[in-house]
Image (cartoon, helix red, strand yellow):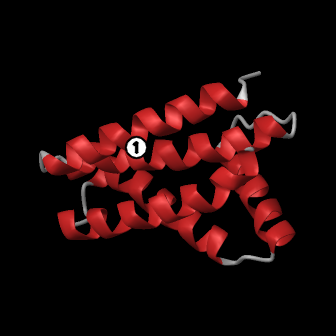
Amino acid sequence: MGTANHYLKLNRKYLSEGEILLAKGDHAQASEKFWGAAAEMVKAVAACRGLELRTHADLWAFVTKLRNELNDPEITRLFSIAGMLHQNFYEASMTIEAVKDSAESIKRFINKLEKLTT
């Protein structure tokens, strides 16, 4: 089982790599990094609670649990954007502007969850 610190390091790594790729105009690769950053933050929160998430279904179930605990529907909406970015990695259908806007949503998602790791 991974530790919360491990997942937080990956979160920061993927977030930074996403920014670099976005600046280079590689929005498909940047999309996957931002998805990864969001997923690693979810895993970090779960690890703080002694849980390990292995599948997309596990991630969604835990995100929904957090949404309900915090009574914050924005959590599921923001994680949906992460899912769109993950799809964009395979299809490259989003414009660079859409990826940039989505990256900002991912940062908002991460900020909401980060306080749950302390």
* Rendering quarter of residue 111: bottom right
Give amino acid for label 1. Leu
Position of the N terminus, as image quadrant, is top right
Of residues 65 and 61, the one nearer the viewer is: 65
Q: Residues within 10 Å of mark 1 (few under 14, many from 20)?
A: many
Q: Is residue 85 above or below residue 32?
A: below
| Secondary structure found at label 1 | helix
Residue under the point 44% across and 62% down:
84
| 91 or 106: nearer the viewer | 106
Q: Quadrant of the C terminus?
A: top right
Q: In the current view of this chain or complex, which residue is farthest to the front?
A: 118
Q: Position of residue 112 (x, y in %)?
A: 63, 62
Outermost left residue: 24
Quadrant assignment, res 99: bottom left
Residue 51 placed where, x, y %? 84, 36
**Residue at 53 percent of width and 50 percent of height:** 38
Question: In the figure, is residue 61 to the left or right of 49?
Answer: left
What residue sits 69% from the left and 54% below the top?
115
Q: Against 79, is 19 above or below?
A: above
Q: Tag count in the figure?
A: 1
The image shows residue 13 at horizontal and vertical percentages of 42, 33
Q: Position of residue 73 (x, y in %)?
A: 69, 78
Q: Is residue 52 above or below residue 101?
A: above
Q: Disc 1 designates what residue? A: 15
Q: Is residue 57 left or right of residue 105?
A: right
Which quadrant of the figure has residue 75?
bottom right
**Above or below for 28 versus 78:** above
| Residue at position x 58%, y 73% in the image | 77
